[in-house]
Image (tube, grey):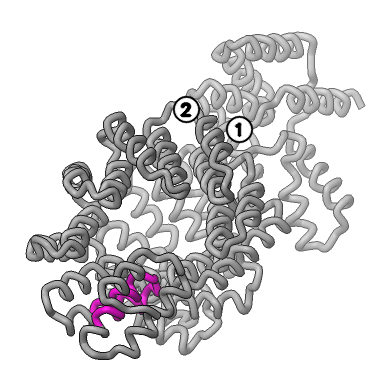
């Protein structure tokens, strides 16, 4: 009984003093048997209480029977007190020395915790090594030991552990272990030694699909794409319905067309292959084939209607396709599903901002504010800042300009970029209220205050053009091009301005062509290209570009431009239909109004 009492006392003392290592999560010492208990419950179907009791008994059985003498108690208490006052080396050495004397792994674990807190990597490894040596059956000790050794110079120390685990694992579990070992070994300093070790470990299972995939991944990491393809194809032969093998082969193939052909054939044979279908959808997104990508994500969502990743992707795709109703439905479901799953750590804030914008676009300003009210306080500072800018914008649209400006004035920030955003937002409030001269003065001052902020300069340029200051507009846009040579919006804006004013058309064409080269899928640049062709008298080319732009984005201004081209070509009914569509979407559109006035028409 005396020994039993001593063991419990020592365990309680260590548990009370313990702090989890900061590098990896760790359970308290007394809970170390829980993973073992869960595994036994699965295998032996014991009830939870009986399993836990058995696991604790097994843990106690393999721990040494240590008598807690008064001297040892004094040393432990002194070490803990010194550690709490900021010392680490003396307490660490005390714990390590006592662990070596008593062979108690709990003391080695405590020494490791002290070294971790002191950010002493070498001392941590020494303590963890002793902890693992004293209790090799401890899953926690093994995990820490492997995790630390893999980044040290003693890589060979973990090979026996890996070899034993693979040998004792069931066939179903062995493949997962191979992948985990490979991921760990990618962190090794000596990549060649890690690769050679991995090959030795998987050699006995070399013909399995998993071993082939591991070899393919290793080959790809070395830059051997041909070897990676060979191993991935062999993995598919070993298991033709393996999604991981198909995805591995796709990763090793450079040609996108070949990847799509691979996915198409795989999905034909395995229509329920969700990961391959999702990968195919992502390629379609990169190709800007939004309708096809949307179709794939809808297939995925059909089987998993609460999959938040797919709901979010579909919301973004619907937005890109100018389907406001679809986007609102998908993002609303996304937010609802997250709300029902508080353990899901995904942040709904971006979806909430989009929902606010969608509500505003359909005239529901109160709804737009209600979505903003749902943005959680714990989201990142930039998103919170953006939500406040949007709130000010919506309040301004409600007609309460004073409150909107007060809200912006209350956004105190030391970040110059955010200060510039506040200036742009306030200028937009003034423009929306019809106070364009005040907006211009504000932006003129902001451009002097933030001369290196390309976004602000771009916005100032557009306002200057509306005010008739085309010289200021061109100067600001050229400054944006100098600061941000890849800013296709600046090239497009200047090119379009020249085309709209019907001046320097060759220069305008060159600017728009450069913008299109940088962003070939942008419908607004296509619109500009169509418009410059119209100005240059190339009606067929103009119609081609404008039709493509309108197919991608049914924007009122694109409709107006396409209508004028068709009117010029004699297709007046089609032109009038496009103008009616534009008026239905934006009854106060300036481009439509000036176009009809210039042509002497009315609808």
Q: Are marks 2 and 1 in contact (CB under 8 Å)?
A: no
Q: Which residues are magenta?
A: 544-565
* Residue 331 placement: quadrant: bottom right
Question: How many numbered dots are placed on residues in this image?
Answer: 2
Residue 213 vertical position relative to residue 447 in the rendered view, above or below:
below
Residue at numbered disc 2: 121
Verify whether residue 248 appears in magenta: no
Q: Which x, y percent locates residue 99?
A: 64, 23
* Residue 533 placement: quadrant: bottom left
**Mark 1 crowd level (few <14, some 14–19, many ≥20, 10 Å Cα):** many
Residue at numbered disc 1: 131
Q: Which x, y percent locates residue 288?
A: 36, 72
Verify whether residue 548 appears in magenta: yes
**Residue beneath the point at 23% across and 53% down:** 490
**Residue beneath the point at 24% across and 77% down:** 545
Residue 86 vertical position relative to residue 156 in the rendered view, above or below:
above
Q: Is residue 161 left or right of residue 596?
A: right
Q: Which badge, 2 or 1, comes first in the chain's sequence? A: 2
**Mark 2 crowd level (few <14, some 14–19, many ≥20, 10 Å Cα):** few
């Amino acid at each position: 009984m005396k020994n039993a009492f001593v063991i419990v006392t020592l365990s309680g003392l260590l548990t009370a003093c313990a702090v989890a290592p900061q590098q990896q999560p760790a359970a308290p010492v007394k809970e170390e048997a829980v993973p073992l208990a869960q595994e036994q419950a699965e295998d032996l179907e014991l009830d939870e209480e009986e399993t836990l009791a058995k696991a604790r008994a097994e843990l106690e059985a393999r721990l040494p029977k240590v008598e807690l003498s008064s001297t040892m108690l004094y040393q432990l208490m002194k070490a803990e007190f010194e550690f709490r006052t900021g010392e680490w080396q003396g307490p660490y050495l005390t714990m390590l020395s006592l662990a070596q004397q008593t062979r108690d792994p709990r003391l080695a674990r405590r020494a490791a915790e002290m070294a971790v807190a002191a950010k002493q990597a070498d001392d941590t490894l020494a303590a963890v090594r002793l902890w693992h040596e004293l209790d090799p059956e401890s899953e926690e000790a093994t995990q820490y030991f492997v995790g630390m050794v893999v980044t040290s110079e003693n890589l060979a120390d973990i090979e026996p552990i890996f070899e034993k685990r693979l040998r004792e694992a069931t066939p179903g579990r062995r493949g997962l272990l191979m992948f985990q070992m490979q991921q760990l070994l990618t962190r090794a300093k000596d990549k060649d030694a890690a690769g050679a070790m991995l090959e030795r470990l998987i050699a006995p299972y070399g013909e399995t699909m998993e071993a082939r995939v591991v070899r393919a991944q290793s080959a790809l990491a070395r830059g051997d794409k041909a070897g990676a393809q060979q191993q991935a194809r062999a993995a598919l032969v070993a298991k033709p319905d393996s999604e991981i093998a198909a995805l591995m082969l796709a990763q090793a193939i450079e040609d996108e067309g070949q990847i799509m052909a691979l996915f198409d054939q795989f999905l034909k044979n395995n229509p329920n292959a969700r990961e391959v279908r999702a990968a195919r959808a992502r390629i379609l997104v990169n190709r800007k084939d939004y309708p096809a990508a949307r179709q794939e994500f809808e297939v995925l969502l059909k089987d998993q209607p609460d999959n938040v990743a797919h709901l979010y992707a579909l919301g973004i795709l619907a937005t890109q396709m100018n389907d406001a109703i679809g986007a609102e439905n998908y993002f609303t479901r996304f937010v609802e599903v997250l709300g029902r799953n508080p353990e899901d750590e995904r942040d709904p804030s971006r979806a909430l901002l989009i929902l606010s914008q969608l509500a505003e676009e359909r005239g529901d300003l109160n709804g737009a504010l209600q979505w903003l009210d749902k943005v959680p306080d714990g989201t990142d500072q930039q998103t919170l800042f953006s939500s406040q800018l949007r709130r000010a914008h919506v309040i301004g649209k409600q007609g309460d300009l004073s409150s909107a400006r007060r809200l912006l004035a209350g956004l105190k920030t030391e970040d110059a970029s955010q200060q510039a955003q506040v200036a742009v937002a306030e200028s937009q409030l003034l423009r929306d209220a019809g106070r364009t001269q005040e907006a211009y003065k504000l932006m003129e001052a902001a451009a002097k205050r933030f001369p290196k902020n390309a976004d602000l300069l771009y916005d100032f340029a557009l306002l200057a053009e509306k005010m008739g200051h085309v010289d200021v507009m061109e100067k600001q846009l050229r400054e944006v091009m100098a600061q941000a040579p890849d800013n296709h919006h600046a090239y497009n804006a200047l090119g379009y301005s020249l085309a709209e004013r019907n001046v320097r058309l060759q220069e305008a064409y060159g600017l728009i062509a450069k913008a299109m080269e940088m962003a070939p899928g942008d419908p607004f640049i296509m619109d500009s290209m169509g418009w410059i062709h119209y100005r240059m008298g190339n009606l067929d080319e103009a119609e081609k570009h404008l039709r493509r732009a309108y197919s991608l984005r049914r924007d009122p201004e694109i409709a107006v431009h396409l209508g004028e081209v068709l009117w010029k070509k004699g297709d007046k009914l089609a032109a009038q239909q496009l103008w009616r569509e534009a008026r239905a979407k934006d009854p106060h559109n300036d481009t439509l109004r000036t176009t009809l006035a210039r042509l002497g028409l009315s609808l």
